[in-house]
Image (spheres, helix red, strand yellow):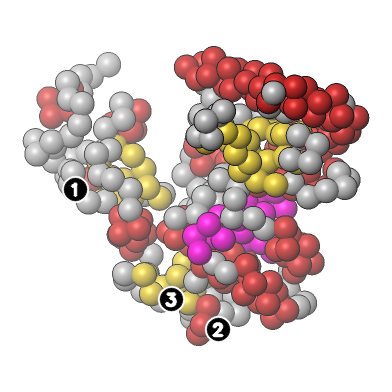
């Protein structure tokens, strides 16, 4: 196996010795011109020295993420007559709506050609859109659908569990919920409007990640008779906020937590167990933990587990609430 070039052989971060830019995004063709072929770029990504931004665009690992960086990256590969839409627009705005496969391969760019023709390019998903002037804004050099329009489009077009996550993300970004609900009527007759009409009233800025949004939708679809509350705080005896529950029902003290691989690995497993044990023993919460397969897997088993967990918590509520009163004395 040939040795790596000296400029990237024994370094923690790329520096001025690198022939590629280390302070801005650059394209694959630029890298080729600088003498860094695809095979070497792949090695640099694997070593954590480069990270891909969008298909065909890279940046040195030390460059912090920002709206300006995302706009710069997409501007390198998007023609001037194109409007950025859907998942790609959400990504630029700072909302996580990328497909889960994005951790393994770069997703295609969602683009709309303002000249009403489809773009037929590798790595591009294109189509026809009826965009009004108020649906489009300029972010740097990009023309991009507004947060409100992007939320409506993703709410219509994505799988419902991903769609609610996108809508929640835009509420966290600042989209007004009432304005979103008012906007739905303009999409009458459009593909997916029935889904948007059902999901938009369920949107909640309290969900902190797409999986939490998906888990909340499972709750709504399970038949549980009360809506879930999000980000429920439990406090220490001195009143200090101590632990936060993803979603649940305070009335019956039933909570549900999503444990994702990225945030609940072996290094924090003991902390998670201690937190759940404290919630059960000190505040008498009945807790269930859900993982990716529960929420997104083929069986979509989260709804049944939520229903059973809620029913069991409701049945045992009187005993547990009496224990809470005894502990408080």
Q: Visible in this render: residue 124?
A: no
- Who's the residue at 56% across and 39% down the image? 101
Q: Report which quarter residue 316 is drawn in.
A: top right
- Residue receiving disc 2: 132
Ranked by sequence position, the earlier of labels 3 and 1 is 1
**Residue that label 1 marks:** 23
Q: The C terminus is located in which quarter? A: top right
Numbered mark located on residue 170 in the image: none
Q: Quick check: marks 3 and 1 in contact, CB under 8 Å?
A: no
Label disc, if present, on residue 137 of the rendered structure: 3
Location of residue 8 in the rendering, given as x and y in whole percent from the top left corner: 18, 28
- 218 relative to 195, above or below: above
Q: Secondary structure at mark 2?
A: loop
Q: Element under label 3?
A: strand
Which stretch is magenta?
A: 154-174
What crowding class fits label 3: few (fewer than 14 Cα within 10 Å), some (14-19), or many (20 or more)?
some
């Amino acid at each position: 196996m040939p040795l790596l070039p000296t400029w990237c052989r024994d370094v923690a971060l790329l520096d001025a010795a690198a022939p590629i830019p280390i302070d801005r995004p650059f394209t694959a063709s630029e890298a080729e011109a600088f003498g860094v072929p695809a095979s070497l770029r792949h090695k640099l990504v694997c070593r954590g020295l480069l990270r891909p931004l969008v298909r065909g665009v890279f940046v040195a690992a030390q460059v912090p993420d920002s709206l300006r960086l995302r706009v710069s990256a997409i501007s390198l590969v998007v023609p001037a007559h194109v409007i950025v839409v859907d998942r790609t627009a959400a990504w630029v705005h700072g909302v996580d709506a990328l497909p889960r496969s994005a951790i393994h391969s770069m997703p295609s760019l969602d683009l709309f050609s303002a000249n009403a023709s489809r773009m037929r390019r590798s790595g591009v998903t294109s189509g026809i859109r009826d965009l009004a002037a108020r649906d489009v804004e300029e972010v740097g050099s990009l023309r991009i659908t507004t947060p409100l329009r992007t939320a409506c489009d993703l709410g219509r077009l994505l799988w419902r569990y991903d769609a609610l996550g996108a809508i929640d993300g835009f509420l966290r970004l600042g989209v007004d919920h009432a304005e979103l609900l008012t906007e739905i009527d303009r999409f009458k007759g459009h593909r997916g409007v029935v889904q948007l009409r059902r999901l938009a009233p369920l949107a909640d800025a309290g969900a902190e990640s797409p999986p939490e949004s998906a888990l909340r939708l499972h709750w709504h679809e399970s038949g549980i008779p009360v809506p879930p509350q999000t980000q429920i705080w439990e406090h220490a005896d001195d009143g200090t906020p101590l632990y936060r529950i993803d979603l649940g029902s305070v009335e019956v003290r039933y909570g549900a937590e999503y444990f994702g691989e990225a945030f609940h690995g072996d290094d924090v497993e003991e902390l998670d167990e201690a937190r759940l044990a404290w919630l059960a023993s000190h505040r008498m919460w009945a807790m269930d933990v859900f993982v990716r397969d529960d929420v997104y897997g083929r069986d979509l088993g989260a709804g049944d587990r939520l229903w059973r967990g809620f029913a069991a918590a409701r049945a045992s509520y009187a005993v547990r609430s009496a224990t809470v009163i005894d502990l408080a004395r």
